[in-house]
């Protein structure tokens, strides 16, 4: 079985809340999850170059930069096939087995308040499968030019281009293989502050 690594913010009230719920669920399903310390706005690096604004004209938030660095720094450690999840990734069935170097397996929030009946869509950064080779590609493409999108967009585009699938094929294939979703408790809040 490939490793499962969860990005979590050590000592953060919201991250601790979600990682406790999700970690317990992963454990009850027989999975061993290894936590990976997330980058915070206080521990950002200088390895990555960000455009002044994202492609949509909005500036990056400090949290968006920290999320980018969390995934990037985890990619640097990948030596074997690995399922990467975030602290709020909740499994509802067994993880899919992927052939090759790429796979996505988490959906946007499914609880009624957040979901509201929209078509299921993949949440790339919330759950993805990579190998040493695909981690290397994710890193190289992130370093190739100034970054102008959130890390979810980078993961989505990189996986799609390497699988050579159209938008419709890509989403339908991965929704069919999905086994997790991001949980949301609006009274607790989320740890991501996005400037969409």
Image (cartoon, helix red, strand yellow):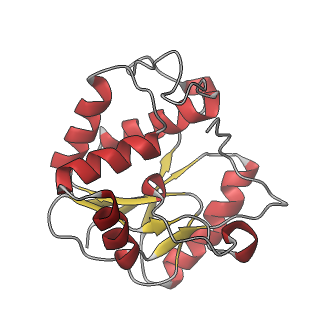
Q: In this view, does 64 lie to the left or right of 131?
A: right
* Residue 82: quarter of image: bottom left
- Residue nearer the viewer, 165 or 152: 165
Q: Position of residue 121 (x, y in %)?
A: 48, 65
Q: Which residue is drawn at 29% across and 24% down?
A: 143
Residue closest to the far right: 187
**Residue plotted at (49% across, 73% down):** 180
Q: Position of residue 190 (x, y in %)?
A: 71, 52
Q: Position of residue 98 (x, y in %)?
A: 22, 71
Pinpoint residue 73: horizontal percent, then vertical percent. 39, 36
Quadrant containing the C terminus is top right
Question: In the displayed structure, would residue 81 be above or below residue 139?
Answer: below
Whether residue 93 can be seen here:
yes
Up/down of 148 relative to 118, above or below:
above
Residue 39, can we see it? Answer: no
Residue ID at (26%, 58%): 166
Image point 60% across, 61% down: which residue?
A: 88
Count every numbered label the image shows and give the total. 0
With 30 as the anchor, is 18 left or right in this view? right
Q: In this view, does 46 lie above or below 12?
A: above
Q: Nearer the viewer, residue 118 or 149?
A: 118
């Amino acid at each position: 079985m490939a490793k499962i690594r969860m990005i979590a913010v050590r000592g953060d009230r919201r991250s601790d809340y979600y990682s406790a719920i999700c970690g317990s669920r992963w454990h009850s399903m027989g999975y061993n999850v290894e936590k990976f310390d997330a980058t915070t706005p206080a521990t950002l690096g200088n390895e990555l170059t960000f455009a002044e604004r994202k492609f949509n004209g909005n500036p990056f938030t400090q949290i968006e930069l920290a999320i980018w660095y969390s995934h990037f720094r985890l990619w640097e450690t990948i030596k074997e096939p690995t399922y990467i999840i975030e602290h709020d990734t909740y499994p509802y069935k067994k993880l899919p087995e992927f052939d090759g170097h790429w796979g996505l397996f988490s959906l946007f929030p499914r609880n009624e308040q957040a979901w509201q009946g929209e078509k299921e869509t993949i949440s790339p950064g919330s759950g993805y499968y990579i190998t040493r080779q695909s981690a290397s590609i994710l890193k190289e493409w992130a370093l190739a030019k100034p970054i102008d999108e959130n890390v979810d967009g980078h993961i989505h585009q990189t996986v799609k281009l390497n699988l050579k699938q159209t938008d419709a094929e890509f989403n339908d294939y991965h929704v069919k293989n999905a086994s997790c979703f991001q949980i949301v408790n609006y009274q607790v809040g989320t740890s991501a502050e996005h400037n969409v």
